[in-house]
Image (cartoon, rainbow, N blue to C red):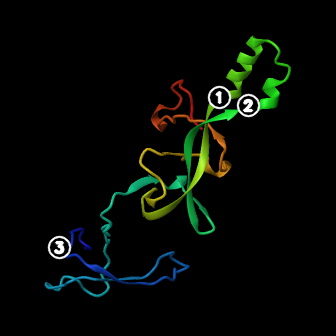
């Protein structure tokens, strides 16, 4: 309410206009509330809180991790992989057994790669967004640098320090 009190009755969305006002960047919404005490008057301003009616489990991730491409939404998931360093480069001129063992060790090296997954997005909550489908609990989501990677890119992980701890001599994240 205008005096910062909470209106005691729950309303419903009646109509949402899909046109965005170019001057204000807003859309028109008609809400219908019961008004038994005549507390609501035409033209009053208020803040409306919308309650999420989805009852299933939902995942919340940073909005900057989501990439939109032609109306579809994707995130990059980090996975451990083992890549070959190139069979022909490591096996050339391997004549002794010590050389072959060394070549086999360098041939397989664990690394972290980003793989693109299509997701179904939900409501935006501040800087975060609800993901309704497409990723599972435990998936490691790439948050920073998603503009510079593609499906299969090798990535590294770093831990960013909070702004209050920067400059204390530790490593800085990217």
Nearest to the observer: residue 16 or residue 167 = 16
Q: Secondary structure at mark 3?
A: loop
Q: CA distance from mark 1 to mark 2?
A: 8 Å
Nearest to the observer: residue 62 or residue 96 = 96
What percent of the width, then of the height, locates residue 93? 86, 19
Locate the C terminus by quadrant. top right
Q: CA distance from mark 2 to mark 3?
A: 66 Å
The reply to whether callout 1 and callout 2 are in contact (CB within 8 Å) is yes
Q: Residue at x 31, y 74 (%)?
A: 46
What percent of the width, then of the height, locates residue 75? 55, 54
Above or below 63: residue 105: above
Q: Residue at x 82, y 30 (%)?
A: 88
Nearest to the observer: residue 69 or residue 164 = 69
Give the mark nearest the N terminus, 2 or 3: 3
What percent of the width, then of the height, locates residue 125? 41, 60
The reply to whether callout 2 and callout 3 are in contact (CB within 8 Å) is no
Q: Residue 85, which numbered label?
A: 2
Q: Residue at x 54, y 24 (%)?
A: 169
Give the mark nearest the N terminus, 1 or 2: 2
Q: Quadrant of residue 50?
A: bottom left
Crowding at dot 2, Cα within 10 Å, few <14 / some 14-19 / many 20+, comes out as some
Foreground label between 2 and 3: 2
Q: Secondary structure at mark 1?
A: strand
In the image, taking residue 91 as reference, residue 78 lies left or right, namely: left
Q: Which residue is mark 3?
A: 8
Q: Residue 109, which numbered label?
A: 1
What percent of the width, then of the height, locates residue 87? 77, 31
Q: CA distance from mark 1 to mark 3?
A: 62 Å
Foreground label between 1 and 3: 1
Nearest to the observer: residue 22 or residue 97 = 97
């Amino acid at each position: 309410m205008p005096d910062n009190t909470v209106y005691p009755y729950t309303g419903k969305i009646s109509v949402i206009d899909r046109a965005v006002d170019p001057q204000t960047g807003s859309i028109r919404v008609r809400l219908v509330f019961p008004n038994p005490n005549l507390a609501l008057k035409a033209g009053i301003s208020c803040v409306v809180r919308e309650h999420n009616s989805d009852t299933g489990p939902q995942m919340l991730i940073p909005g900057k991790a989501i990439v939109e491409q032609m109306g579809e939404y994707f995130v990059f998931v980090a996975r451990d992989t083992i890549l070959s360093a190139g069979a022909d480069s490591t096996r050339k001129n391997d004549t002794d057994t010590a050389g072959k063992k060394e070549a086999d060790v360098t041939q397989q090296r664990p690394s972290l790669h980003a793989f693109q997954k299509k997701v179904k997005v939900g409501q935006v909550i501040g800087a975060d967004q609800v993901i309704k489908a497409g990723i599972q609990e435990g998936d490691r989501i790439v948050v920073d640098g998603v503009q510079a990677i593609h499906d299969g890119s090798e990535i590294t992980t770093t831990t960013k320090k909070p702004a209050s701890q920067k400059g204390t001599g530790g490593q800085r994240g990217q």
